[in-house]
Image: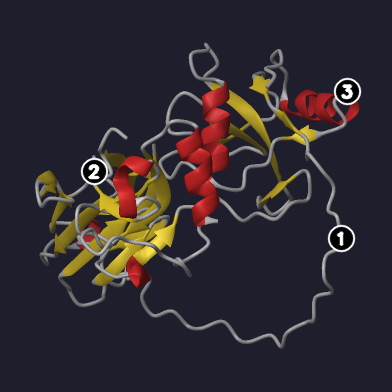
Amino acid sequence: DNRAVVNFASNAGLKTIWLGLSCFGNTTSSCFWDDASGNPIYDNFNSYSPPGYYGNCASMFVSSDYGTSQGKWSSTGCNNAGSMIFPSANGTQASTYCSRVQFTNLASVHSKMELDFIRNIYKGTNTTAIYIGAQADTSDKFNWLDDSKWDFDYMDPLNFNKGKCLVMDVQGDGLWSQVDCSQKMEYLCKQKLIAPATPAPTKIPLEKKQPEILLDASNCNSTLFLAPGEISSFGYPDYSSPPTYCTWRLVTLGPYRLGIFFDFWATYGALNIYDEFGVNIGQFLSPYSRKPFVRYTPFNIAKVTFEPKSGGTGAEVDRGFHATVLPVS
């Protein structure tokens, strides 16, 4: 594969290309492929530019000008320079059009890369939001209309509206929001390119295990916290837990930044956000109560610290904070 990529890229006249690999340490075990397939089984890093040495991203030398280094990988800084749109309809009409006219379904979304692909379709247009192919059942749980697995979630943590249909913001971060299905807006249909060549293997039922009792879901003092996920003050939402100093090293894969969406804040504590180079990009000391807010990091690595402070009684007792961390473009 490595040689095939080199031949293809060099024949196209390229000298260096990006690899879809993010490294957060100086060994390949700290590297992860951007398609979420895990650590690299094979690597070809140059001895003088190992993982993480020059930056958290990776590139490949493909030109013959590099001599014996042709085909070698190098760590590098991540900031180096290296469809059809349909008329507006309500949720039911959109789903019907896709199924009866296009013989498809409203689009389901299964990765950040697919989400970015959809956003790119509407780049430069006046469309701000579109229906996507998810609807809520009687228990208000969303499922894809094409019966595919719900294996990716990009709900807007700061949007608290309720509805049975789902729309995607195509001009912003691509976040999803619930809406009433009677609203009219544009929509996107999606069709599979090919059918599976072979039937899926038979699944052997596994013995069900009792869910683990999770005493604390704050992810406090995580050595490496890979987005998406949630962070909070220790013990949240049980504010009777002892005050605990917490730190998080947040990272995300690929060419993304981090969005930290604070949906709950009722604390006298001090929270600081630092970028990859230790520059403070957000300090929150007061007031006790805040409306939901978001902070974006300039890079794909950040550090968050929280120093609690006991105080308050009754309605203003310290109840901590909660935030959702997402990869954003």
- Residue 101's tag is 3
Q: Quadrant of residue 246?
A: bottom left
User: Residue 300 at what x, y percent from top left?
Assistant: 29, 48
Q: Quadrant of residue 91?
A: top right
Viewer-side label of 3, 1: 1
Point out which mark residue 198 bears.
1
Residue at 48% in and 70% down: 41
Which of the two labelled residues, at mark 3 and mark 1, occupies the earlier sequence position?
3
Farthest residue in the right direction? Answer: 100
Q: If the image is split into quadrants, where does the N terminus sit? A: bottom right
Q: Is residue 33 above or below residue 121?
A: below
Note whether 52 is above or below 192 in the view shown.
below
Q: Residue at x 53, y 62 (%)?
A: 37
Residue 163: % across, % down: 62, 37
Mark 3 Cα shell of 10 Å, populated few (<14), some (14-19), many (≥20): few
Q: Is residue 25 visible?
A: yes
Q: Are marks 1 and 2 in contact (CB under 8 Å)?
A: no
Q: Is residue 226 toward the left or the right of residue 103 in the image?
A: left
Instruction: Return the disc, 1 or 2, that comes first in the chain's sequence.
Output: 1
Residue appearing at x 61%, y 48% in the figure: 110
The three-letter amino acid code for the residue at tag 2 is Arg
Q: Please name whichever residue, 68 or 191, is drawn nearer the observer in this view of the structure.
A: 68
Q: Give the spatial CA distance, label 3 vs label 1.
A: 28 Å
Give, as a three-letter code, the residue at label 1: Thr
Q: Relative to the observer, which residue lies in front, 135 or 112?
A: 112
Distance of mark 3 from mark 2, alpha carbons?
A: 48 Å
The residue indicated by pointer 2 is: 290
